[in-house]
Amino acid sequence: MRHAAAVSGRFSVRQLIARLTPDRWGAATLAVALFVATPLIAVASIALTPAPDIWRHLYDTVLFGYIERTLILIAGLGLGTFILGTGTAWLVTMCRFPGRGLFNWALVLPLAVPTYILAFVFTDQLEYAGNLQVALREIFGWRDRQDYWFPEIRSMGGAITVMTLVLYPYVYLLARAAFLEQSVCVLEVSRTLGKSAWQCFWQVALPLARPAIVVGMTLAMMEALNDFGTVDFFGVKTFTAGIYDVWLNMDNISGAAQLASVLMIFVVVLVVLERMARRGQRYHHTSTKVQALPSYQLRGWRAGLAIAFCALPILLGFVLPASVLTSYAVVFFEVTLNANYLTITLNSILLSASAAVAAVAIGLILAYGLRMGEGPLPRAAVRFASIGYAVPGAVLAIGVIVPMAALDNTIDHFSERVFGISTGLLLSGTVVAILYGYLTRFLALSFGTVEAGLGKVSRNMDGAARTLGASPLRAMSRIHFPLIRTSLLTAGLLVFVDCMKELPITIILRPFGYDTLATFVFQYASDELFEESALGALTIVAAGLIPVVILALTSLRTRPGHANPGGRA
């Protein structure tokens, strides 16, 4: 009996080893995934390095302040995006009022404006020397701040307001899709039971859409945790600003990594809360009929309130910054050109395009490797490597610089010992470091898009290609690549646009004297010369409009059987 058990145990161990051992495709996929995930692993390893002096100093002075301000920021942002995103989604989906068709797609436009650019515009217009306060003093005869009160824009409230105006479309898009997919029968039964329009929304439609709304709020909060430009410009010392301060001003990378590990706890908590909110939530249609959703005609003051509620975030989140930037860009056009605008724009385009090509190529390798390979290890490694989008840029910057510095030192020591020549820093502090950071952070965009595209290609085509003698690489180039070309272009476009406006990674990893449009605008705004960088900011906004237009053309579709939002329901 013991011998049989031992044989059985050995057999189980062999089975386990065989299951965990990847094939050639799996091994290649695992290697690429580990390369991309190295910065994430580096952050975790550095955080375990003892740094008692700086940690005790942070604990005694600023740590709890960072925690408090970060919690206030994401809580205020969550509430703001919930109100704006869910409210506007319900109005354009379920109500009829003038301008509804315009608001249906225009409510996505603020997503094209980076938060730090809107922060610069708001400060320029709303501070003491801004146009609004100057006009108020002239109208009412006020002389100075002692004569009136005006909210301070450079504050926690200002940061929450700016981020809410830019990030609420995450909630709007998902909430609108959830409302469109809801069962007509459930809504009609609630009206039959005497529920008012408000009660239908609050007690029926909102609980049904809760999983989608929570996902949108989580995405917005993760973007807030990644933000550096807004919180730094407004003087709100959150974890991201603290990481930057400890690393560059206190020259302590271990302390910065430990702060980054604490910040990662916030990210993990958000992900867990989002999963918990969706756990066990399953809703099914009670009818197979496709019917138009019941809509509510708004007239009089109710229609006016609906118009104002939908128009306000568009005006403040897109029209105001676009008009201000355009006016400044025209006035200071020659000044901006003389400030190396063309060179900086070329830097941004080349850097973003290179990152997009690399991300799409690696995303294709990983997605195709999972399709062709076997074994749980490659799949787990790919999933881990693709969480970079949830990691703040300041955290990833630390994870990039450490392994690159170690590699540079290894090359330098080898060169000195063998050739007697010091190579210095070949990778750290170069464009390669920025590209590596971009790749780690935005791989999830390209991998997810490519994986979704490959998922639509029948595996029967793989078998047919192998039967006809085509190798996997030939099948990918001759069959899969043409079929998923649109997905590849979409993935590249998304990565390109996000790289164009990425600030934390760029400002930390860039070489000395090297600027992109994001760092150019941030530096000029920090030096109170925002007007001279308006053309650069407008260029970033124009690039951000590309995926927004795609969203407007593809995602913002009406429910089957539902009339055009701009017309009568």
Image (cartoon, rainbow, N blue to C red):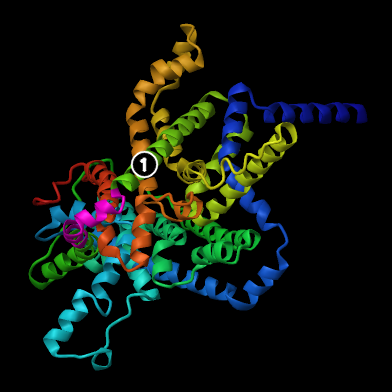
Residue visible at 29% across and 64% down in the picture: 530
Residue 559 higher or lower than 371, as above or below: below
Nearer-the-camera pick, 309 or 538: 538
Main SS type for the magenta part?
helix
Magenta region includes residue 331: yes
Looking at the image, which residue sits at the far right? Answer: 2
Residue 16 in percent (x, y) is at 73, 31
Q: Is residue 36 visible?
A: yes
Foreground of the two, 227 or 410: 410
Instruction: Point out the image quarter for the N terminus.
Output: top right
**Residue 333 within the segment the image draws in magenta:** yes
**548, above or below 119, in the image:** above
* Above or below, 193 relative to 546: below
- Residue 150, position in %: x, y? 27, 84
- Residue 510: x %, y % from top left: 47, 50
Q: Nearer the viewer, residue 74 or 321?
A: 321
Query: To which residue does mark 1 refer?
Result: 496
Identify the secondary structure beneath mark 1: helix
Q: Which residues are the magenta region?
A: 324-341
Residue 331, by quadrant, is: bottom left
Residue 213: percent from left, percent from top? 37, 57
User: Farthest residue toward the bottom?
Assistant: 147
Q: Residue at x 25, y 41 (%)?
A: 554
In the image, residue 98 sits, relative to residue 177, either above or below, namely below
Residue 29 found in image quarter: top right
Q: Quick check: can you spot residue 285?
A: no
Residues 294 and 425: in front is 425
Q: Amino acid at mark 1?
A: Phe
